[in-house]
Amino acid sequence: MARTPNDIEYLISQISLGDREAFSQLYDATSAKLLGVCLRVLNERANAEEAMQDTFIKVWKNADRYSINGLSPMTWLITIARNTAIDRLRAQKPVSDINDYSDSLASKLPSPESNVAHSSDMKRVSECLEELGDDRGAAIQGAYLDGQSYAELSELYKVPLNTMRTWLRRGLLSLRECMDR
C-alpha cells in the first residue's frame, strides 16, 4: 500500500523513538525508490544496494533530526540516499594527478560508431516498449527506470498488486523476446 507523506513522517517519528516495526514499514514503503536514487548515481546494482543499506542505517541513527517542515519527507530520505551514494562514489575514485590521464582522455569519448549503436539500441528498446501497450510499457518503465514500487504502480493503474507483478514479469519476457528479434 502506498504511503502518504503524513504516514512517512509518522514512521520517521516512531523510528526516532526506536520503533523497529516502524523502521521495517518505512523500509518496505521507500526502499525501491531509494534504491533507484542510489542506482542512478552509482550505475552498479550491488554498490547501489550497499549505499541504500547505509542510507537506512543513517535514517535509523538520525531520525530524531528530521523536522516536519511542510516539505515531503521523501525529500529528506532521497537527500540522504543521494548524498550517501555520492560519498560512496567519491570514495571509489582514487585521487590522481591529471598527467596520469593525459594520454587516455581522447580514448574515453564514445566513438561515432558507438554513438550510432547506442542510439539504435535505445530506439529498439522504445519500439519494444511500445509493442507492449501503453499501460504495460509505462509500468515497466516506472518500475525499472523510475524506481516506482509495485504497490505504487498497482495503485496508479488501478489493478491488484499481483496483477501488476504479472504485468511486469510478462512484460519483461516480451521485451526480451522483442529485443532478440
Image: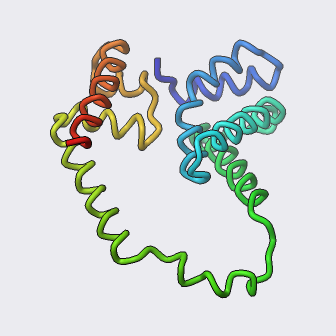
Please say if 61 is above or below 71: above
**Image location (x, y in percent) of residue 34:** 59, 38
Please say if 162 is above or below 138: above
Residue 27: quarter of image: top right
Q: How many marks?
A: 0
Front-lying residue, 40 or 131: 131
**Image location (x, y in percent) of residue 161:** 37, 15
Residue at the location (29% across, 28% down)?
Answer: 173
Is residue 129 something that shows in the picture? no
Front-lying residue, 136 or 151: 136
Residue 35: quarter of image: top right
Residue 56: quarter of image: top right
**Image location (x, y in percent) of residue 95:** 81, 71
Please say if 181 is above or below 152: below
- Placement of the C terminus among the 4 image quadrants: top left
Residue at the location (44% across, 34% down)?
Answer: 148
Is residue 81 something that shows in the picture? yes
Front-lying residue, 114 or 8: 114
Front-lying residue, 48 or 79: 48
Residue at the location (21% across, 39% down)?
Answer: 178
Left or right, 138 with reference to 58: left
